[in-house]
Image (tube, rainbow, N blue to C red):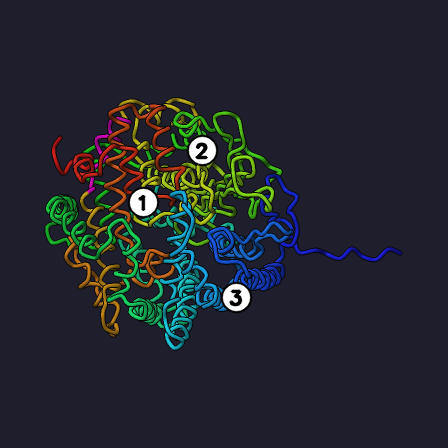
Amino acid sequence: MSEEKVRQNPFFQSYGTPHDTAPFDRISIEDYEEAMLEGIRRDEEQIEKIINNPEKPTFDNTIISVDDEKDGEGYYDLLSRASTVFFNLLSAETNDDMDALAQKMSPILTKHANDIRLNEKLFERIKYVHRHHRKLTPEEKMLLDNCYDGFVRSGALLDAEGKERLRQLTEEASILGLQFSQNLLKENKAFTLHITDEAQLDGLPDTAREAAALTAKEQEKDGWVFTLDFPSYSPFMTYSTQRDLRRQMYMAKNTECIHDNTENNLEICKRLINLRREMAQLLGHKTYADYVLKHRMAGHVRVVYKLLNELIAAYKPTAKKEIAAIEKLAKKTEGKDFKLEPWDLGFYSHKLQLQKYNIDTEMLRPYFELSKVIDGVFGLANRLYGITFKENKDIPVYHPDVKAYEVFDKDGSYLAVFYADFHPRKGKQGGAWMTEYQSQWMERVDTKKPFGPDNCKNVRPHVSVVMNLTKPTEEKPALLTLGEVETFLHEFGHSLHGMFANTRFESLSGTNVWWDFVELPSQFMENFAIEKEFLRTFAFHYKTGEPLPDELIDRIVRSRNFNVAYACMRQVSFGLLDMAYYTQKEEFTDDIIPFEKKAWEKAMVTEQLPDTCMTVQFSHIMSGGYAAGYYSYKWAEVLDADAFAVFKKEGIFNHATAQRFRDCILSKGGTENPMDLYKRFKGSEPTIDALLKRNGIRKR
């Protein structure tokens, strides 16, 4: 009898899949830890080779070796392969075993990163190359500067005591950031509103009712179940006539992670703020914001506040008028003694929008069937850049909701793999994001010969967008809102940044750019959502096939700036809150909830409730990498309005303009200063004028 074949860890070998994509169907939970630990061992071996190299340190034998762990001797970058899949799935398809492994591995991985960044012998070689190097290309110079500065910013210049303290701080922050995210996911999934009396569905459109019935069926309950996932929560808050139930939903959403239970994030947030402050000060900066902004387009705290204050001055008067108009309608409807509460805002705002523009989310849903929206978004990319998408069912996926596509360039050559994960589910974080399973870089074919056009392979990226869009029901396909179409376009813009990447070094490719520049490609794409020429390509009624009527498109365009100032103030308030936490110079000891209310008060145009809290669920600035960087969305909005104004002037589908945008911005990654890239595209620096005109704040 033959021996049973020993199962092999898929991370340790070539995947044998189309384009060497991750073999999700063959990976087990045990594979991650084994591969990550072995990857750490291999990394350590490689570092020893670098620091024990008897040759004089050079750019090639030190900087490239540190940046590029694929050594051409049969090693894969094992740690990156395994950890990338693991942490991507931790957000998109987690479970209790994954969560437990993340808690176990995060401090180990943080320690490993610290071991590299705080290795004195390695830094001595890097420092030598930084001072003595051959003539470098601009991309090589950027890599060298980033490498040297990355080590300095990670504590390489600290004394032994300082390095040890930094290790402690970063390892604790890693654990707490993970715990923050896990707590938020558990709180979000723990709440449901279960309705068995059909009368309590009054006002809700059929799509919301059908989705809630499907959720109830999935949970083996009678009636209808509503959750805090956006496709369920938002329609309920907009349409439900049951004010007490709207309040229940609102309070559940806005009190996540402040309850007296194990998912409370209040002390975690406080500790994260202090950990980051202490890290920054240990590294010679006054505040964490000063540390972060050194590598941002804004550059200084004062520049961020200048932008936020300019937006408050420009938009707040209009925002107050917008809220007053909603209040006026509510009192007219309910009586002069009616007090508008936060859970009333979406409901009466929707009624006012109907009154002013006769436009409604539900009117548009039948024209935004998901498969047609996919065709429209892909068609837009084809019209702008000539690229095409072809679904490949041989590419493994991690959940049946996920679709995998091969992407081909305008000359027919293979460009990338694109994954799209559309709908909410139990083990998936809320929101929407873009990530990668493999980045782009240029790989030397023969490692014994110098890099060059005849000795390199362009390794193409595997890009993924993860969203929480409206699910199909038993009666209807997935019908999206216009806002969800914009979300798709936003994340797709990020994916184009990744797919068009064309740089030599992986650490400079795609979205590896300064964070107040990274939102330009994504927010730029949102502009197309209300362009008639674009809508004409895919917005057809899912039953009749009739195109979205011109008259309805005109109403969409006219209503574009409805409550735009209030939306701006909301974003600015988040930016103010973020900066308030990360400009702390002394230990932060305030109670989070009252501190939050005061921090963003300047941008508030509605009354705040004392027993709600945003901070404890503000993933962007606590666990998502946007700490001292949330202003980036408004910064990039100035850029995207300015850039789209160029397209409006030259033609929104102008091939030459699109090619210039691809060549100057989308393909360049972080190889140059982002302002230089932007000026090369437009010919001048951006101004706030295009944004003010687009929003109707300043007349044309």
Residue 586 placement (x, y as % from top left): 23, 73
Nearer the observer, 80 or 95: 80
Q: How many marks?
A: 3
Task: Give the amino acid at mark 3.
Answer: Met
Of circles 1 and 3, which is in front? Answer: 1
Q: Magenta span covers which residues?
A: 553-564
Residue 507 is tagged as none
Point 16% across, 57% down: residue = 607
Residue carrying label 1: 673
Left or right: where 188 falls relative to 457: left
Q: Earlier along the polypeptide chain: callout 2 or callout 1?
A: 2
Left or right: where 128 falls relative to 610: right
Task: Give the amino acid at mark 1.
Answer: Asn
**Could one spot residue 426 in this view of the protein?**
no
| Disc 3 residue crowd, few under 14, some 14–19, many 20+, Cα 10 Å | some
Marks 2 and 1 sit apart, C-alpha to C-alpha, by: 33 Å
Residue 149 placement (x, y as % from top left): 36, 58
Residue carrying label 3: 105
Task: Give the amino acid at mark 2.
Answer: Ile
Marks 2 and 3 sit apart, C-alpha to C-alpha, by: 37 Å
- Looking at the image, do the residues carrying marks 1 and 3 touch, with CB atoms under 8 Å apart? no
Residue 374 is tagged as 2
Residue 677 placement (x, y as % from top left): 31, 39
Asked if residue 311 lies in the magenta stretch, the reply is: no
Quadrant location of the C terminus? top left
| Disc 2 residue crowd, few under 14, some 14–19, many 20+, Cα 10 Å | some
Of circles 2 and 3, which is in front? Answer: 3
Residue 199 placement (x, y as % from top left): 35, 48
Asked if residue 554 lies in the magenta stretch, the reply is: yes
Q: Earlier along the polypeptide chain: callout 2 or callout 3?
A: 3
**Could one spot residue 120 in this view of the protein?**
yes
